Each structure stands twice: as structure tokens, then as C-alpha cells.
Image: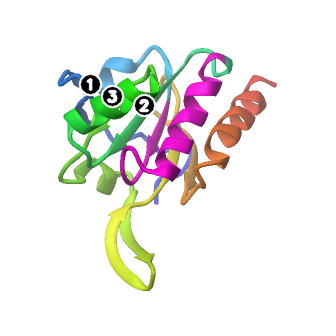
Amino acid sequence: MLKPGDRAPAFTLLDQWQKKWRLTDQQDQRIALFFYPKANTGGCTMQACGLRDIASQADGVQIVGISADSPETQARWDEKHQFGFPLLSDPDHKIATKYQAWGPKKLYGREYEGILRSLFLIAASGRIENVWMKISPKETPHRLLMALEESNE
């Protein structure tokens, strides 16, 4: 399990506009990296809209989302909700696996493997500051803001 102080696993993925996005290119800022199961679903839309709505309060933090959805699906979702942050495509869930955000889930008694909704706050140094695994969509923006306030004290 990744924990505060660990180096965030580096990666390169395509964003919703088919452009390569590299974690190592973001060294001048903090990153709020959230993993979500599926674009354009109720919980994921609530989570991403909540982060969009607090982005101006998360000064100096780049919000970035990752799911297994294609860049085209991510682009349609972004156009619909105007998120204003990168949505990255991890179709083979290699990055989700590196972040331990891929694992067993249950829905209506059915067990399957999927993305575990989670949030990682990554320092400009590339080290993990905070980790929230299996976080609720509603709690995601609140937990991020609370962590940012605590780190500013």
C-alpha cells in the first residue's frame, strides 16, 4: 500500500485530447490524482464536478483524473461538464495497479475486478502527501481541501 512519504509511481498516459500527460513533467506543482471507475456515471460525475467546483480553492494544485475509459469517452464527458483538468485513459489499468487502485469489488452480490475510487495528494517533489482509498464521491473534494488547509498551517 502506498503511504505518505513514498515516491509516487511515474507514468505517462493519454489525456482526453489524445495528448501525452507525464507525471514527471509536473514537478513544479502538487497533484491531486483521483481514480474513478467510469466516466459519465452518477458517482463519478459527482466526484469530478465536486473537484471542479473547489479547484479555485485548491491553489497551486493540479487536479487529474484517471479511469479505464478511452480518451474519446473522457472528452465527451469533459465537454458535457467542463471540468477544466486532465482526464487520463488507463485502459489496461497498469497505472491503477501501480497505485493499488485496482482490485476486487462487489456490486449486487457480483464480484469483479475494477478501479477502486481513490485520491492521492502528490507533492511537487514527487512524494505522496496523503492517500484516501475507497473514498466516497461526495467526500473527495472535502478531504482534499481539509488536507490542503492542514498543510498550510
Q: Which residue does the image show at 59% across and 22% down from the upper left?
A: 55
In the rendered image, which residue does mark 3 sit on?
A: 23
Q: Position of residue 122 (x, y in %)?
A: 50, 33
Disc nearer the start of the sequence (2/1):
1
| Image-based side of 122 in relation to 40, left or right | right
Rendered view: 129 above or below 21 = below
Disc 2 and disc 1 in contact, CB within 8 angstroms: yes
- For the residue pair 26 and 90, the one nearer the viewer reads as 90
Q: Position of residue 94 (x, y in %)?
A: 23, 52
- Please give the label number shown on residue 21: 1
Q: Farthest bottom residue?
A: 109
Check residue 47 for magenta coloring: yes
> Marks 1/3: CA distance?
7 Å
Name the mark nearer the viewer: 1 or 3: 1
Assign a secondary structure to mark 3: helix
The picture quadrant where one finds residue 70 is top left
In the rendered image, which residue does mark 2 sit on?
A: 64
Q: Which residue does the image show at 58% across and 55% down from the upper left?
A: 135
> Marks 2/1: CA distance?
10 Å
Bounds of the magenta span? 32-56
> Marks 3/2: CA distance?
10 Å
Q: Position of residue 118 (x, y in %)?
A: 50, 51
Disc 3 and disc 2 in contact, CB within 8 angstroms: no
Disc nearer the start of the sequence (3/2):
3
Q: Amino acid at mark 1?
A: Trp
Name the mark nearer the viewer: 3 or 2: 2
Q: Position of residue 18 (x, y in %)?
A: 17, 25
Check residue 104 for magenta coloring: no
| Image-based side of 63 in relation to 71, left or right | right
Give the main secondary structure, helix, strand or loop, of the magenta stretch. Answer: helix
